[in-house]
Amino acid sequence: IGGHTLATSVVHISDEKVLFAGDAVWVDQHPYMAQAVSKDWLEGLTYLRKLTVDKIVPGHGPVCGRDATERVSDYIRTLRSRVRQLQRAGRSKTEVASTLVGELVPWFPIPPDRKPKIEAQIKAGVGRVYDELRSSGS
């Protein structure tokens, strides 16, 4: 389905109503977006929500239901929207990343010992979305 990376794949076992979502779904964690195509990721999550499933086995986090895909979608949509706003205001990629880290950190719990790594991960994802939106003219 793409999204997280171009090779992001899922396995749907329809008889069991189980979806192995791999890195398309992250539960209670900041998704790693440094290689992502955010528009494809959103489309992939929409597709997953249309499948008949009782359980989703995410790539990161506990087994969940279909509703867990909404939080990841909300995060990606918010990230895209804020990057677009700041780009249109003439902000550089570095400025946008610095601004958005503070806004995005509260979305998911972060263990104190992992905070620097997660902040760097968020910055990388912001940079990726910045480039994606700039190249697409969105």
Image (cartoon, helix red, strand yellow):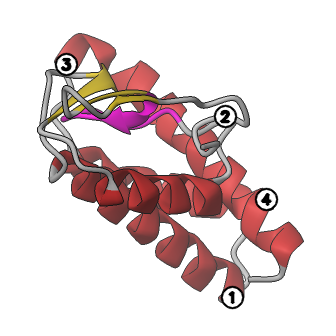
Q: Residues within 10 Å of mark 3 (few under 14, many from 20)?
A: few
- The residue tagged 1 is 88
Up/down of 132 relative to 106, above or below: below
Q: Determine which of the numbered discs, if any, sits on residue 131 in the image.
A: 4
Percent from the top left, x then y, of residue 48? Answer: 38, 50
Of badges 4 and 3, the one in the foreground is 4
**Residue depicted at 51% across the width and 31% down the height:** 121
Badge 4 amino acid: Asp
Q: Is residue 46 magenta?
A: no
Label 3 and label 2: CA atoms lie apart by: 27 Å
In the drawing, does residue 133 fall left or right of residue 4? right
Q: Under tag 4, what secondary structure? A: helix
Percent from the top left, x then y, of residue 13? Answer: 33, 26
Of badges 4 and 2, the one in the foreground is 2
Asked whether residue 47 is in view, the answer is: yes
Of badges 1 and 2, the one in the foreground is 2
Question: Which stretch appears magenta?
Answer: 22-32
Quadrant where the image shows the C terminus: bottom right
